Every structure is written in structure tokens, then in C-alpha cells.
Image (cartoon, rainbow, N blue to C red):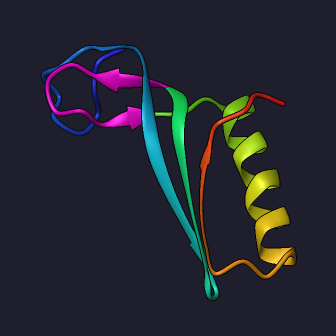
Amino acid sequence: MKCVICKKGETSDGKTTLTLERNKAVLVIRGVPAQVCRNCGEAYVDQIVTDNLLKVAEEAVRSEIQVDVREYVAA
């Protein structure tokens, strides 16, 4: 797919690191599967991965973490 940010690069399978913040919780998730632009590095995550990330984030907020770094694990 063509990158909607730089409008020049094509995306390919890759991995990215996402930082999610909510209230006082900060969650960093590494190794997230994504389509990554070869030109600018913008990452696009599909709906299944997004749903999984949101579940992990909700669990982290409920457990009252302040900062947590994790590797992505598929559901």
C-alpha cells in the first residue's frame, strides 16, 4: 500500500514499537506486527492487532501500572 503520510513510499511487512498512554499508565509494546513505510517509517497496524493491543492496555490500566515495557504476543 502507498503511505498516506509521505505519499512516496510503499509499505511492507515489519514490526514497530507502540507507546500507549492513559491516565497515569504508560505502556510500551515492542515487536508489534505492522505494515511499515520503506520511505518514512510510518507504521500501520491492522484491526486484529489493534484489538489485541487495546485489551492489553485495558488490563494494564486496571492493574494500575505506571510504566510497563512488553513484547507483543498475539492473542
Please name the residue shown 64% across and 87% down the image: 23
The residue at the point 38 percent across, 34 percent down is: 43
Q: Identify the image quadrant of residue 41.
A: top left
Tell me: 43 left or right of 4. Answer: right
Question: Vertical placement of 29 versus 57: above or below?
Answer: above
- Specify the quadrant of the image occupied by residue 35: top left
**As drawn, 6 above or below 3:** below
> Closest to the observer: 17 or 40?
17
The residue at the point 24 percent across, 39 percent down is: 5
Answer whether residue 40 is magenta in the image. Answer: yes
> Quadrant of the image for the C terminus?
top right
Q: Is residue 29 magenta?
A: no
Q: Position of residue 22 (x, y in %)?
A: 63, 78
Residue that appears at 29% across and 33% down: 4
Q: Is residue 11 left or right of residue 47?
A: left
Front-lying residue, 25 or 2? 25
Range shown magenta: 34-43
Coordinates of residue 31 in the picture (x, y in percent): 52, 32
Task: Give left or right: position of 36 versus 29.
Answer: left
In screen coordinates, is 13 left or right of 31? left
Image coordinates of residue 58 in percent, x first then y, are 81, 65
Q: Where is residue 72 in the image (x, y as percent from the top left)?
A: 64, 37
Viewport quadrant of the N terminus:
top left
